[in-house]
Image: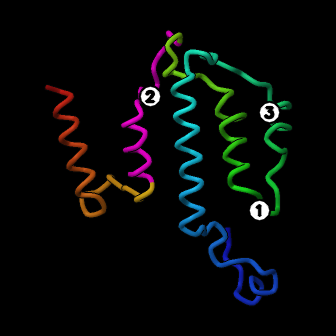
Amino acid sequence: MRELPDETRRALDIPADILALDPDQMRRLGYEVVDRVIEHLTTLGEQRALTTGDLVTLTTQLGGPIPRQGSSISENLTKLADIALANQQHGEHPRYFARVPGPSSYPAILGEWLATGMQSVASSWGGGSGPSTLETIVCSWLRD
């Protein structure tokens, strides 16, 4: 997306960082996500292993085309969990006997969240010597 000139942004009253959140908002949203993941993992056996929706229904449930105005992050996370992520295969489900595309555990989820939140890049030594070293250690442990 191309950057708007400052005078246009001021005229439209668009903040410079449209996704900026204050620390209290970040905490509240983080706790919402933690609670949703825990609810999902602790009720997994009661859920379906695979749910497939149709395009028209899912498009309608998700709100149709991308809106031009912002909306509640909390409401969007609820839609993501209740609609988008509910209509997929759950490889971690106890009755899912097909391939396991991404085995996970709660500690792994926490590590992924931490690495994502700290913008971890392990694609080069200069950009991520710590994560690259950890990856090497884990891979050698898995080989042995």
Is the residue marked by circle 3 packed among few (<14), some (14-19), or many (20+) residues within 10 Å? some
Quarter holding residue 8 = bottom right
The quadrant of the rendering that contains the N terminus is bottom right
Residue 117 or 45: which is nearer the viewer? 45
Quarter holding residue 49 = top right
Q: Horizontal placement of 29 versus 109: left or right?
A: right
- Marking on residue 110: none
Q: Secondary structure at mark 1?
A: loop
Please determine whether, in this image, residue 21 is positioned above or below residue 35: below
The residue to which callout 1 is attached is 70
Number of on-image labels: 3
Give whichever of discs 1 and 3 has the lower sequence position. Answer: 3
Is residue 55 on the magenta stretch?
no
Give whichever of discs 2 and 3 has the lower sequence position. Answer: 3
The image position of residue 66, as x and y in percent, is: 79, 52
Q: Horizontal placement of 118 versus 8: left or right?
A: left
Distance Cα–Cα, label 1 vs label 3: 20 Å
Distance Cα–Cα, label 2 vs label 1: 32 Å
Quarter holding residue 73 = bottom right
Please determine whether, in this image, residue 32 is positioned above or below residue 86: below
The image position of residue 54, as x and y in percent, is: 80, 25
The residue to which callout 2 is attached is 102
Q: For the point 51% across and 27% down, which residue is it?
A: 41
Distance Cα–Cα, label 2 vs label 3: 24 Å
Q: Amino acid at mark 3?
A: Leu
Which numbered mark, 1 or 3, is in the foreground of this view? 1
- Marking on residue 58: 3
Is the residue marked by circle 1 packed among few (<14), some (14-19), or many (20+) residues within 10 Å? few
Is residue 113 on the magenta stretch?
yes
Dots 2, 3 in contact, CB < 8 A: no
Q: For the point 68% across and 51% down, which residue is it?
A: 74
> Which residues are the magenta region?
96-116
